[in-house]
Image (cartoon, rainbow, N blue to C red):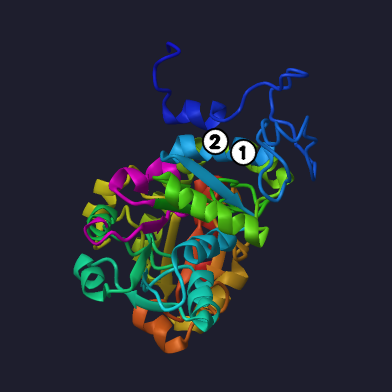
Amino acid sequence: MTPKSSPHFKTREVHAGVTPDPTTGAILTPIYQATTYVQESVDTYMDKGFSYSRSGNPTVVALEHKITALEGGVGTACFATGMAATSAVMMALLNAGEHAVVSDVVYGGTHRLSTQVLNRFGVKYSFVDTSNAQNVQDAIQENTRLIFTESPANPTLKLTDIAAISKIAQDHGIPHCVDNTFLTPYFQRPLELGADLSMHSTTKYIDGHNITVGGSVTARDMEHLEAIQFVRNCLGSIMSPMVAFYTLQGCKTLSTRLEKQSESAMQIARFLESHPMAEKVVYPGLDSFAQKDLAESQASGFGAMLWFEVKGGVASGKKLMDALELWSLAENLGSVESLVTHSVTMTHADMDPAERQRVGITDGLVRLSVGLEDTEDLIDDLRQALQRL
């Protein structure tokens, strides 16, 4: 590889944003655990790029450079949590009296932020089925200032045609933000499909080890990036240097982890689809997945999330989750440990029950996040739990 060549993804995830420490030669970016930065003079204030760690920190900046290199765009802002990232996007782009179009199936925290917090300040929301681009077109109002989609959606895995929605957004001069948490830039790059912003809960696959909570937003133009950074500085919601350090390390194995996790997810989905106790199995790689063509056209992989319903409804689902041994009952996803979640009582508990049912988040939905354990062991554990039903 010549110095001028463009490194491939796996090289970028290891090396992008990171250089040996100039003082010691340390191969890892140091944890700059500092509040403030001494200036040489008033006239040279900020010449070194930092003044106060609420506004910027060298360790955090290294992670921001790495994520930018993976997602594309002009820059990234990292946050204390994924919800802090979502909040900054909405607060940067929406004023009182303005309107946003949001996917009807999104992470429960995004729905809660929209309907129980920002709505109190006069922001209006329309939750629509963004898998049909015409629905988005029809929902746009004169005061619409943001289109926010999540694809694949949590937890139903419903897909949005990112390019089609981005084209609508561009035609109306409205920024389009995509929550890219489930597929990450390794499998899907929204900015290349026309979106203006790509956000993550870095807590999930970017970290990948259940160590940190964090978030990121990568922008396609400086105007949006600077607006989001301004809100982050005002709210004090920047990622901590320690979290950035851990995330820098976890990110280096992103592609390797996702390849194995997705391969296992496909095998597990096929096993469940053939099991008599599984009433419904949803995974983008299955031929039975209604949007498989879209999954193949806008992403290079199917991811490691799937869900299913067991015969017997909620009661059977609870018995199943209690009987599992390798699958940990927990709310996170994207980690090396395999996790099982009951969305209705955990991640989406605050949603109105009728609204949950309307968008397909059924009471018996069992969400699986496939980790790095041996696939055969994970299937055996599901088999023994299903046999108890």
Q: Is residue 233 left or right of residue 5?
A: right
The residue at which mark 1 appears reads as 61
User: Which sits in the foreground, 14 or 128?
Assistant: 128
Residue type pointed to by label 2: His
Q: Which residues are magenta?
A: 170-196
Residue for point 57% across, 30% down: 17
**Is 188 included in the stretch rendered in magenta?**
yes
Residue for point 47% across, 34% down: 69
Residue for point 66% across, 31% down: 47
Residue type pointed to by label 1: Val
Question: Which residue ends up furthest to the left in the rendered image?
Answer: 134
Residue 338 visible in the displayed image: no
Q: CA distance from mark 1 to mark 2?
A: 6 Å
Residue 23 visible in the displayed image: yes
User: Which SS class for mark 1?
Assistant: helix
| Residue 103 spot, x, y in % from top left | 36, 69
User: Which sits in the foreground, 232 or 105?
Assistant: 232
